[in-house]
């Protein structure tokens, strides 16, 4: 029996299937995965790397051999599109390429795109030159700024745009017992627009230990090696002060332990127009940690300045150091902000609420 919906997620070699991700979540090894939970809510097929290899059409598998896994997934979704009442792309690249194929074929115009960075440079030709938005019925975004820009720049109707704030598995990421160590952390890879250089300058000479960490997805060795190379190129180990260390590819439970041991999270960001860093920010908030974050154009929907975190200007190590020192000097303030952050997660970022909202949007999409 064919599923009513299909969710296309970006695939990579060795990508775990939904049932494996679900099993790891049940065993407590990792948080629940949003697209897996959404697939259950929609009774949807997940077109990932494993699906392509096991059940993909010959045409899609041929496309994957030539252009890579993602191209194969796009072709698979296009070739089989009439099987499904709802077709959901859980990545900008997949959704825009699929919309282009549908437009060229004068086919369905009701795709649902769950977008992360719709206004990124690589997307301009799809939206500005080829106008593929004509074949996307609904766009769901994590941040309001990106959707506002999409409406203003490309004329996408406002009623086609929906905000569903970053979800976090509040059952996996939750406050831990005990006092934190004399430690603060910052989480995320260099390619996620982190400004670790400013952070290193800000904390140089502080007596507090600072841990830079990159959480681990289940990636190929090639991807892991490339992430490590980029990190070391941007922040050479020999240039780090004694109080700063870093750890790459932390499994979820180890990352959770790092949040628990830390007094608070620092999120130094480059100036971007989307909510970079929001995954780590909401994880830390769910753990009951205050957050110091760079104020930029795209980061407006999560942190409430002075309530659950502190905003600082971009590329200003003095301001960043002052904010860090403020929370180090006032642990009661850090604790109050952390508690407020946890309350905000429970009110606005729970994974089940996100899934319910997106599932409703998909079912009502046209």
Image: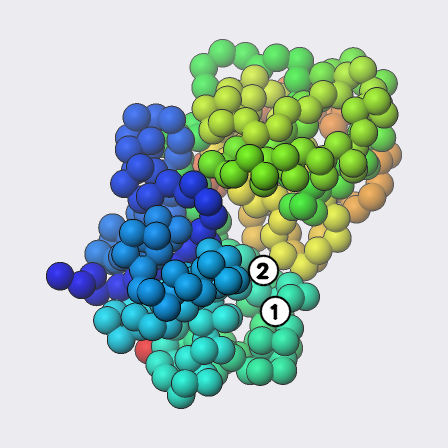
Residue at 30% in and 70% down? 80
Q: Which comes sooner in the sequence, label 1 or label 2?
A: 2
Quadrant where the C terminus lies? Answer: bottom left
Q: Is residue 20 left or right of residue 192?
A: left
- In the picture, the quarter occupied by the N terminus is bottom left
* x and y percentages locating residue 49 in the rendered image: 39, 51
Q: Which residue in the protein does label 2 denote?
A: 117
237 to 73, vertically: above or below: above
Tell me the mark number nearer the camera, choosing from 1 and 2. Answer: 1
From the viewer's perspective, tell me whether residue 37 is left or right of residue 324. left
| x and y, in percent, of residue 122 in the image | 64, 66
197 relative position to 55: left or right: right
The total number of labels drawn is 2
For the question of whether residue 277 can be seen, the reply is yes
Query: Quick one: SS at disc 2?
Result: loop
Contact between labelled residues 2 and 1, with CB atoms less than 8 Å apart: yes
Can residue 321 be seen here? The reply is no
Q: Looking at the image, which residue is at 34% across and 72% down?
A: 79
Q: Which mark is residue 190?
A: none
Mark 2 closeness class: few <14, some 14–19, many ≥20 residues within 10 Å: many
Residue 359 x/y as whole percent: 31, 59
Within the image, what quadrant is residue 61 found in?
A: bottom left
The answer to whether 305 appears left or right of 62 in the picture is: right
Query: Looking at the picture, how far across and down is residue 161, in whole percent?
Result: 47, 70
Q: Residue at x 35, y 48 (%)?
A: 50
The residue that appears at 62% across and 28% down in the rendered structure is 248
Q: CA distance from mark 1 to mark 2?
A: 9 Å
Give the number of the disc on residue 123: 1
- State the image quarter where residue 111 is shown: bottom left
Whether 181 is drawn above or below 325: the answer is above
Question: Closest to the observer: 182 or 21?
Answer: 21
Q: Quadrant of residue 305?
A: top right
């Amino acid at each position: 029996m064919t599923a009513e919906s299909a969710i296309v997620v970006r695939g990579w070699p060795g990508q775990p299937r939904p049932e494996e991700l679900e099993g790891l979540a049940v065993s407590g090894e990792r948080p629940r995965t949003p697209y897996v939970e959404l697939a259950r809510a929609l009774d949807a097929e997940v077109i990932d790397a494993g699906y392509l290899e096991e059940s993909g059409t010959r045409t899609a598998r041929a496309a994957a051999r030539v252009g890579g896994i993602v191209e194969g997934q796009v072709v698979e979704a296009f070739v089989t599109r009439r099987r499904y009442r709802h077709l959901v792309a859980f990545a900008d690249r997949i959704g825009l390429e699929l919309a282009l194929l549908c437009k060229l074929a004068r086919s369905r115009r009701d795709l649902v795109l769950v977008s992360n960075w719709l206004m990124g440079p690589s997307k301009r030709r799809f939206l500005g030159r080829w106008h593929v938005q004509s074949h996307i019925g609904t766009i769901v975004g994590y941040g309001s700024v990106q959707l506002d820009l999409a409406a203003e720049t490309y004329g996408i109707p406002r009623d086609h745009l929906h905000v569903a704030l970053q979800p976090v598995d509040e059952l996996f990421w939750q406050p831990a017992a005990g006092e934190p160590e004399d430690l603060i952390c910052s989480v995320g890879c260099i390619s996620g627009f982190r400004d670790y250089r400013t952070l290193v300058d800000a904390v140089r000479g502080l007596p507090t230990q600072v841990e830079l960490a990159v959480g681990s997805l289940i990636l190929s060795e090639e991807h892991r090696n490339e992430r490590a190379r980029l990190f070391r190129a941007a922040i050479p180990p020999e240039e780090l002060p004694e109080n700063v260390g870093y750890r790459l590819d932390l499994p979820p439970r180890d990352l959770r332990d790092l949040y628990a041991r830390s007094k608070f999270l620092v999120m130094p960001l480059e100036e971007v127009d989307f909510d970079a860093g929001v995954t780590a920010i909401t994880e830390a908030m769910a753990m009951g940690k205050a957050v110091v974050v760079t104020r930029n154009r795209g980061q407006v929907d999560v942190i409430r300045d002075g309530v659950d975190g502190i905003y600082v200007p971009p590329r200003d190590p003095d301001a960043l150091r002052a904010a860090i020192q403020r929370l180090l000097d006032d642990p009661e303030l850090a604790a109050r902000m952390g508690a407020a952050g946890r309350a905000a997660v429970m009110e606005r970022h729970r994974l089940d609420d996100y899934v319910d909202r997106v599932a409703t949007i998909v079912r009502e999409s046209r």
